[in-house]
Image (cartoon, grey):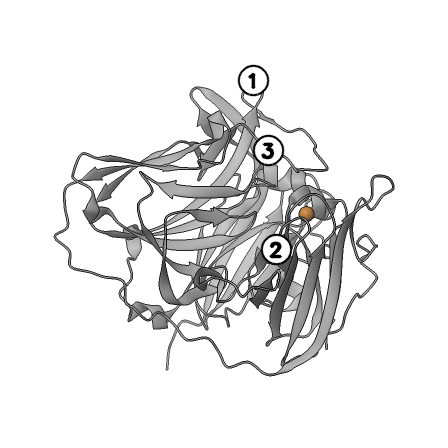
Amino acid sequence: KATKTLEQYQITMRPGTADILAGQPTPILGYDGRFPGPTIHATRGREVQVTQSNQAGRNLVVHLHGGVTEHASDGHPMDIVGAGTQRVYRYANVQRGATLWYHDHSHGEVAQTLYAGLAGFYIVNDPYEDALELPRGEYDVPLMIQDRSFNADGSFRYQLDLDMGFHGDTILVNGAIAPRMKVERRLYRLRLLNASNARVYGLVLGDRRETLQIAADGGLLPRPVKRTLIPLNPAERIDVVVDFRQFGAGTEVILHNPSGEATTQAVMRFDVVKGGAEEAQVPKLLSELETLPPVNAARKFVLSFQSAGTAMWQINGQGYDMNRIDCRPRLGTTELWTFVNNSPHPHPMHLHLAHFLIRSVDGRPPGPADASWKDVVAVQPGSTVVVRPYFDYYTGVFPFHCHTAEHGDNNMMGQMEVE
Ligand code: C2O
Ligand code: CU
Ligand code: CU
């Protein structure tokens, strides 16, 4: 039968300007010269090809974060798209529906390229989800949250902080400072992404109103989980459903970040307008977790800091080496990976390719919001986190690393070869 099996996108990585400050354009480096980049909409089971052409005047690498992607299209730091060249990335979208994002992965330079604007959403829609009647279309809203600072001429100001990673003094949502969004009195799905270099958020809606978390990095949770505080570590995604029927028309509802400094507390605001006598509810059952094959190996990764040398941030006493394989998981198995943080800073640890379940944090099982597929887990100072990755689709070489951009750049990165 004549079904459309392939979708093609053409993106140019190039300099551009963004209208963030009134009347003062901000130079950026963006996908299609935009900040954030264009949102790619994929469908589970249908391949997407993205031709990325590099007109940025520097070497770049495109990584689909959270993507279950074959090695050749993963954006391994070695697979550079040289200035003036292009590369076709093939995404098979074999995974369940989820909120993914694509960003630059030039080793040692991600703190600059991500900061300059190279990030965009990639949403995998899942026909299975359609039956759940979750909010969609204009009621399904991706929100990319980032922090920036500005120079007097309107350009982004960056200051290297190897310890803490960059922290800006202004919060942007989809490239705008404290934007306002008109919402009807009905359900909305908000896809929250922390695309900041290093900042951790704790988001609160209004006067600690309840939101329903429905998805984490890897897709739908088994059941919705009530949240009044939404923690968001670098690179994490959390999808929540907000019921704006609880607010009267004319109400202004602020999404804020109470743990921030004075200037990084306000995130965005929703202006509730009339509308929708809608009856919709979030279903009580959202998804089922796959049955997992048994654990085939256990590994330990000690995260530490060394104040001199080229590899300041280390995994098992070593910095990243593109030519070294740190472990060889077998295709079709699960493993137990223990992260021990022997350093004074948190590390949001991320695996390419393989999603994982969190098994324990300091010996305790995770709460219900963390009891589904993840690709980032924050490991706090002094803490031990055990995760169970599932190597279910592809063989090949893939990195794993701390997603605080300044830590990953400074070599807190390892490499697995799935065999
Ligand atoms: Cu978003 Cu290798 O990471
Ligand atoms: Cu990734
Ligand atoms: Cu780190």
> Which residue is label 1 attached to?
153
The numbered mark at residue 212 is: none
**Farthest-out residue, top:** 152
The numbered mark at residue 167 is: 3
Is 353 placed left or right of 146 in the picture?
A: right
Q: In the image, which is nearer the foreground, mark 3 or mark 1? A: 3
Along the viewing direction, whichever of 335 and 181 lies nearer the viewer: 335
> Which residue is label 2 attached to?
63
Q: CA distance from mark 3 to mark 1?
A: 20 Å
Image quadrant of residue 118? top right
Q: Tell me the SS state at disc 2.
A: strand
- Report if the beta carbon of the residue with label 2 is closer than 8 angstroms to ligand 1: yes
Residue 170 drawn above or below residue 73: above
At 54% from the left and 21% from the top, the residue drawn is: 154
Image quadrant of residue 300? bottom right
- Report if the beta carbon of the residue with label 1 is closer than 8 angstroms to ligand 1: no
Within 10 angstroms of label 3, few (less than 14), some, or many (20 or more) residues? many
> Label 3 is placed on what type of residue?
His
**Farthest-out residue, right:** 309
Task: Look at the image and tell me whether residue 70 can be seen.
Answer: yes
> Counting residues from the N terminus, which is met first, the one under dot 3 or under dot 1?
1
At 16% from the left and 40% from the top, the residue drawn is: 248
Q: On the rendered image, what quadrant is the C terminus found in?
A: bottom right
Q: On the rendered image, what quadrant is the N terminus found in?
A: bottom left
